[in-house]
Image (cartoon, grey):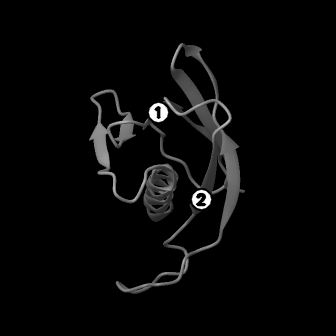
Amino acid sequence: MKFARAGMMFAMAAVMLFIVIAIIPAAAELNITHTIDGKTIFSNGSYWIEWDPVSNHVTGDQFYINGTTNLSIGTVLTCEFFDPTIYCRTKNCKQLGSGISKEIIVESGNQPGTNTVSFFINTT
C-alpha cells in the first residue's frame, strides 16, 4: 500500500511535468516553485501553470487534479498519466507501466487573466 502511494504521487508529478513541457518552448527556461500551501508552479517567465496539492491516493481512488494558468481559454493540453513503477524492477528500467492519455482544455477562470485546468483520474 505504501509503495502504491509513492508510485501514484511520482506519476502525478510526471503528469504535471509532461503537461508543462508540452506548452513551454524548448529554448525557454523552466522554473518550478513549491509554495508553502503545497501548490506547485511551473513557469517560463511568460506562461505559468499552478497545480493545487494532491493528497495521497491508492489504486481504486477517483479524484481530480486542478490548477490555474494564464494560458488562453481553449488551449489544448495533452495529459499522460501512468504508473512508472508497476513493471519496473531495476534501476535502469526503460519500460513504463500502463496508463492513459487524454486532452484537457483550458477553461475560463473566476479572475481576469487566470483560467483553470482540471482532469479526472480514475485508478480503478
| Relative horizontal placement of residue 107, taking residue 24 as reference (left or right) | right
In the rendering, at what x and y percent does residue 122 appear? 70, 51
In the rendering, at what x and y percent does residue 53 appear? 44, 36
> Label 2: how many residues lie within 10 Å, few (<14), some (14-19) or many (20+)?
many
C-alpha span from label 2 to label 1: 17 Å
Image point 32% across, 50% down: which residue?
30
Q: Residue furthest top?
A: 111
* Up/down of 29 relative to 71, above or below: below
Work out whether residue 114 or residue 123 is closer to the camera in this orientation and state it.
Answer: 114
In the rendering, at what x and y percent does residue 84 appear? 51, 70
Work out whether residue 39 or residue 3 is closer to the camera in this orientation and state it.
Answer: 39
Image point 38% across, 33% down: which residue?
39
Work out whether residue 7 or residue 93 is closer to the camera in this orientation and state it.
Answer: 93
Residue linked to disc 2: 81
Residue linked to disc 1: 52
Q: Of the numbered discs in the image, which one, if any, rests on residue 74?
A: none
Q: Quadrant of residue 102?
A: bottom right
The amino acid sitting under disc 1 is Asp
The amino acid sitting under disc 2 is Phe
Q: Secondary structure at mark 2?
A: strand
* Up/down of 97 relative to 94, above or below: above
Image point 30% across, 45% down: which residue?
32
Image point 34% across, 43% down: which residue?
44
| Relative horizontal placement of residue 82, taking residue 28 as reference (left or right) | right
